[in-house]
Amino acid sequence: MPELAFFIGKGGVGKTTVSAAYAIHRASQKSNSRVLLVSADPAHSLADVLQKKLGSSRMNIPQKGRGKLAAWEIDSAKLFRHFLDRHKRDLVETIERGSLFTAGEISSLLETTLPGMSEIAALLAIQ
């Protein structure tokens, strides 16, 4: 059964470093284990931690050990933009019905960087 592990918290506390160490450890435990390490950090520091150039798609990371490790630094802004392009009208309509805000106010708010958008984009990517 697939296992998901999330590393969340305030910026700059070492989430990327700890999650990379955890992923490497999990991948090395069994010969048939496959681990995908996904980072939604806009700073894209996972490549630095792994000392590998990562692109916009999943990349296999060679390692000593028995399992397989892959890493993916998602472009959360691009994924969220794609999501908004497909669903913005429905979102605005739904929010407008349940609030005092106008469609124009809601629409412009969705165009700004809101807290948690990177995490939402990561969940969209996992889906």
Image: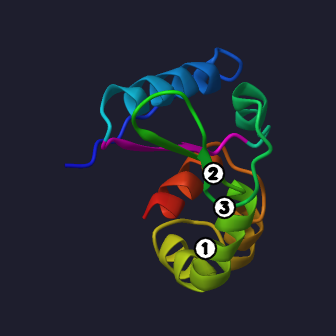
Disc with the residue nearer the chain's start (3 vs 2):
3
What residue sits right under mark 1 in the picture? 83
**Residue 71 in the image: x percent, y percent?**
59, 45
Give how far apart the Cα atoms at labels 3 and 1 are.
18 Å
Foreground pick, 44 / 54:
54
Give how far apart the Cα atoms at labels 3 and 2 are.
19 Å
**Residue 107 in the image: x percent, y percent?**
71, 73
Mark seen at residue 117: 2
Residue at 30% of width from left, 43% of height from top? Answer: 32
Q: Disc 3 vs disc 2: Cβ atoms closer than 8 Å?
A: no
Disc with the residue nearer the chain's start (1 vs 2):
1
Foreground pick, 22 / 118:
22
Q: Quadrant of residue 53?
A: top right
Magenta region: 32-41
**Residue 76 in the image: x percent, y percent?**
68, 56
What residue sits right under mark 3 in the picture? 57
Q: Quadrant of residue 79?
A: bottom right
Give how far apart the Cα atoms at labels 1 and 2 are.
11 Å
